[in-house]
Image (spheres, helix red, strand yellow):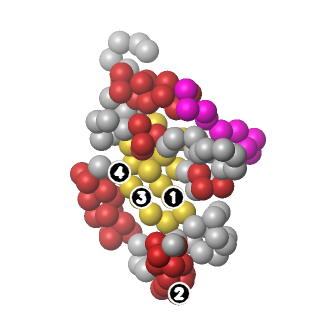
């Protein structure tokens, strides 16, 4: 980069089943990506709605599971897992990033679908009992 040029602060990735190719990052590539983020002080936005749809012996570890210094904010969604109309999602990450995200969400979302939230919450309760 040229001297004085601004560097990015955020790295956005869809590591599993990325559109349009369906390509996924393997564990080694995720470790390399995380190392680059650490080197340049980047926050990683891990948008991973297809994570739970990995088939095989074991799922590839998430970037969040590799996070040792609070730089990964992970997004999951039921829209790919359960039904496209179940637009219920959640974020996981360091408390400081989640608190900032919550403040922005409160200021920008009018209201999410209560029926979808109730259905997903009931399903998660059933899964938790198993």
Q: Tag on residue 115? A: 2
Q: Residues within 10 Å of mark 3 (few under 14, many from 20)?
A: some
What residue is drawn where x is 41% and y is 78%?
110
Q: Can residue 92 be seen? A: yes
Which residue is the site of mark 4? 93
First of labels 1, 2 by sequence position:
1
| Measured Cα–Cα span from mark 3 to mark 2 | 20 Å
| Measured Cα–Cα span from mark 4 to mark 3 | 7 Å
Residues marked 4 and 3 touching at CB (< 8 Å):
yes
Q: Tag on residue 91? A: 3
Magenta part of the chain: 18-28
- Report helix, strand or loop for mark 3: strand
Residues marked 1 and 4 touching at CB (< 8 Å):
no
| Measured Cα–Cα span from mark 4 to mark 2 | 26 Å
First of labels 1, 3 by sequence position:
1
| Measured Cα–Cα span from mark 1 to mark 3 | 6 Å
Which residue is the site of mark 1? 76
Q: Is residue 52 above or below residue 109?
A: above
- Report helix, strand or loop for mark 1: strand
């Amino acid at each position: 980069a040229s001297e004085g040029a601004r560097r990015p602060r955020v790295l956005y990735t869809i590591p599993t089943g990325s559109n349009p190719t369906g390509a996924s990052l393997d564990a080694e590539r995720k470790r390399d990506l995380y190392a680059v983020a650490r080197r340049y002080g980047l926050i990683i936005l891990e948008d991973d709605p297809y994570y739970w749809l990995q088939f095989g012996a074991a799922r590839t570890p998430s970037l969040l599971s590799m996070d040792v210094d609070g730089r990964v904010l992970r997004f999951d969604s039921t829209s790919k897992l359960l039904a496209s109309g179940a637009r219920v999602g959640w974020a996981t990450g360091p408390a400081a990033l989640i608190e900032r995200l919550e403040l922005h969400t409160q200021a920008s979302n009018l209201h999410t679908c209560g029926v979808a939230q109730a259905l997903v919450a009931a399903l998660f309760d059933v899964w938790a009992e198993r």
